[in-house]
Image: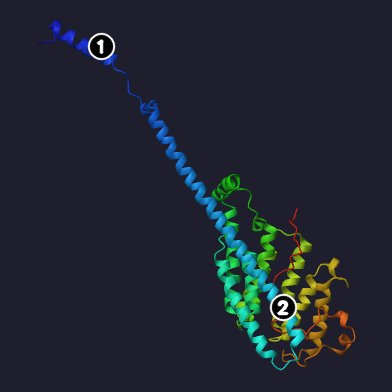
Amino acid sequence: MNSNDPRSVDLRIAKLRERLREKPKTRFEFLKDSSKIISISAFIISVATTVYSWRKDDLQAHEVARRQFDSTMQQMVDAAFKNFELTEKHKTEPRFGQLAGWFNAQQGLMGNKVVQDLASVHDASMLDYIMVGYTLMNLGQNPRAATLFERAIEIGHQRKKEHDQIVFKVIRTIETKLFGEKIDLSLSDEQRAHDLVSAYTSLGLSLLNQSKTEDARKAYEAAIQVTTESTLIEPTKRYYLSFIHKNWAEAIFIIDCKLALSHLQTAVEYMPEARKNAEDVDWQSIQYALLWGSAHCGSDGKLHGDGPPANLADHPQNSPSPGPAWPTPNSAAAGGLPTSQLPSKAP
């Protein structure tokens, strides 16, 4: 059969007609099969439901852990008040030391429990770590307290980086739509500066209680840097700086009272003019500390004497708080800024 053979031409024409009669195959031809569509849809719904249920259960588990942590912290606060009341009531009794030992053991056990509870809180904030750090510092566990303060600082800087990322904002928006709004105070630049200053100053105090003077100095200087680089308005920024130097002075008074007095002078310089009045507790505390320190600080930088100056003893209202002669290592403020002092953002 050659090319001129009419049968060859007819055969080719027949094959072309056969191809034309065939239905063209499309890429998504399987979608025309309703059973396959139903199977694929069921699989997608199953996966989505499983993920949603897992995430919901995970959030509920975190809520349970959070409630347990809050409950343990409240128990520690109640136990501290009870311990104080019983101490005042029975401190003159001969067997008071035995009772105090049991209370100290109870506080130690609860301190360990609150640390364990904190570890189970997935989204613990800077403030959570700072509070537990205070608790451990009051129990004399300064190394563990320092570790928690360092973790609080790490969280503060980490959250800042995360919140500036597009992926984080997208994930947060999706979770908000699915599971509701989640309040996170650390999203605020002002609150983050507040908590970071509290964490750094608390870390400085815990390091000084371990005689780590140089490391403590770096912590206080870091608190100053956070404040100066923040977007706080000037009066609030000056108050923070005054607070840091005041706290630093209280912490190092028994180590080097001359250096402490210089920090108190700096605190006076930074204190906003509007707060320099007799009604302001912080201002009165600084003034009292300057008078007390000047009367008891020797040329060698060491404290001499164990009582307030005579002119202050006649006017107890000048004292910032009742109690033993100020200051002692553990009577200094734990380091946190007053939570009522809400900073403002620069316009």
Residue found at x 76% / y 66%: 238
Per the image, label 2 sits on a secondary structure element best described as helix
Residue 277 % position (x, y): 88, 71
Left/right of residue 191 with respect to residue 28 in the rendered view: right
Q: Percent x, y for residue 117?
A: 57, 67
Label pair 2/1, CB-CB below 8 angstroms: no
| Vertical order, 279 against 7 (above or below) | below
Nearer to us in this view, 127 or 153: 127
Query: Which percent across, then down, holds residue 328?
Result: 72, 84
Which residue bears the numbered disc 2?
82
Question: In what element is the residue under mark 1?
Answer: helix
Three-letter amino acid code at the position of disc 1: Arg
Viewer can see residue 339: yes
- In this view, the residue farthest toward the top is 6
Relative to 111, is 196 above or below? above
Which corner quadrant of the image does residue 329 belong to? bottom right
Name the quadrant of the N terminus. top left
The numbered mark, 2 or 1, whose residue comes first in the sequence reads: 1
Residue shown at 74%/90% (left/top)?
Answer: 303
Label 2 neighbourhood size at 10 Å, few (<14), some (14-19), many (20+)? few
Residue 222 visible in the snapshot: no
Question: Within 10 angstroms of label 1, few (less than 14), some, or many (20 or more) residues?
Answer: few
Question: In this view of the protein, which residue sits in the foreground, 98 or 58?
Answer: 98
The residue sitting at 80% across, 90% down in the picture is 307
- Kindly report the distance in space between the C-alpha atoms of the residues bearing marks 2 and 1: 99 Å
Between 32 and 236, the residue placed more toward the observer is 32
Colouring of the image: rainbow
Quadrant position of residue 269: bottom right
What residue is shown with label 1?
A: 17
Q: Amino acid at mark 2?
A: Lys
How many marks do you count on the picture?
2
